[in-house]
Image (cartoon, grey):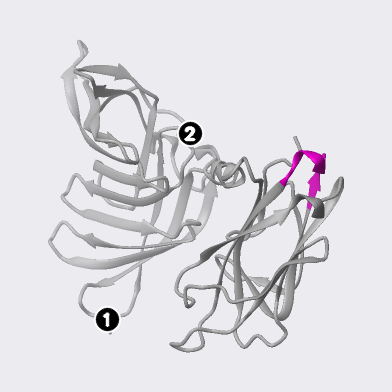
Amino acid sequence: MGIAPTYADFSVTPARLANADVTSDGAAFAGSHLAVTAGGGVTVGFEVADPADVEQVTLTVTALVSKSGSSPGYAPMDVLVQGEPVVEGLTVPGGGDLPQDNVFAVPGHLLKPGANTLEIRSSARARTMLWLYRVTLDPVWERGRSERARTAAAARDTVFAYRTESRPAHDPSAAWRPAPRLVFHVDRGEQSLPAQLGWRDTDGAETAVSFQSNMSDFHGCRRHADGTVHEYRGRLTGRWSSLEDADEVPPSALRRFRTEEGWGGRWHASGELRLLVDAGGTALERATWRDQRGNSGVAVLHALEEEAVGEPVRGFTGYYQRHNEGPIGYRGTEIGLGRV
């Protein structure tokens, strides 16, 4: 293999890295990205085993230029590999509203065996900030490989905790007030981060939220059991791969289900669903979600038939829909309390 999956993800600190080490000058973590000042830059070191196996590299730099008030900002970007310019004075498109994927072809002859360097620089004439979100490098015939590796690595930590606030709807002058902590874990074993989450409690309260792509924040709304509606937002305070590592979350809060998917006129065994949503309310009655790959699901929890000892068997009924496919049936039977 000429070059292993290579990425630098600056949406978290410390940055998530694969086949990369990073140094910077005039750059600082700013919540979901590196903010690079005028004349500053980031250097990514990466290893190449055999350049002869790499005809060309696809380099993707996800970035934006911060605004100047309500107008587009100014922070031209230079990109160099081994000190040779790939692009000079590039204005990142998009006007500063959303990060943009800037894709470049890097000739294979610029690579050498062993240590290589990628530099991303903001012009000394920049008047606003260059925000860097992530960098990936792939052999031209293996497009998207590093991004798939990055998202899979990011999805290993699937237990999230948020500090939350709410304020009355339709009253922008109202102050945000602290709300109970949100802890959640929705996992079908598909290694994809959530994009949206909704739930209903047994007292009738309902909540729907949408997450930043790096999971740092969410925004949404809540309708309480008494019918009042609030805006709802949160900021990430903890993230773990195991419920055992989560702060003050009892393992008994986790629901685990043996599941089946319905298609082709019959039911087929599927993977385990692990479900936890704790926002300080009553017990969970329904959960809905969509992940960052575009897959979505619904699980309505209910009691099934009673066992001989008189204890109800709990389960769920719902649907699941993979990206660009039709919906299928989805159901499960609880398999007992457990840990993530």
Looking at the picture, does residue 146 appear above or below residue 339?
A: below
- Which three-letter amino acid code belongs to the residue tagged 2? Val
Horizontal arrangement in the rendering, residue 18 relative to residue 30 (left or right): right
Horizontal arrangement in the rendering, residue 14 relative to residue 147 (left or right): right
The spot of residue 118 in percent (x, y) is 76, 60
Q: Which residues are magenta?
A: 46-55
**Residue at coordinates 19% horizontally, 66% vertically from top-left?**
229
The image quarter containing residue 78 is bottom right
Looking at the picture, does residue 81 appear above or below residue 190?
A: below
Q: Which mark is residue 287?
A: none
**Residue at coordinates 59% horizontally, 84% vertically from top-left?**
128
**Residue at coordinates 77% horizontally, 38% vertically from top-left?**
53
Residue 17 appears in the rendering: no
Crowd band around label 1 with a 10 angstrom C-alpha radius: few (<14), some (14–19), many (20+)? few
Q: Most extreme residue toward the left, as rendered? A: 227
Q: Which residue is mark 2?
A: 340
The spot of residue 233 in percent (x, y) is 36, 65
Q: Which mark is residue 172?
A: 1
Looking at the picture, does residue 330 appear above or below residue 37?
A: above
Looking at the picture, does residue 38 appear above or below residue 325?
A: below
Q: Earlier in the sequence, mark 1 or mark 2?
A: 1
The image quarter containing residue 79 is bottom right
The spot of residue 262 in percent (x, y) is 24, 23
Horizontal arrangement in the rendering, residue 82 relative to residue 20 (left or right): right
The number of numbered badges drawn on the structure is 2
Horizontal arrangement in the rendering, residue 62 relative to residue 164 (left or right): right
Image quadrant in which the N terminus is located: top right
Q: Check if mark 1's residue and mark 2's residue have beta carbons within 8 Å.
A: no
- Which three-letter amino acid code belongs to the residue tagged 1? Pro
* Secondary structure of the residue carrying numbered label 1: loop
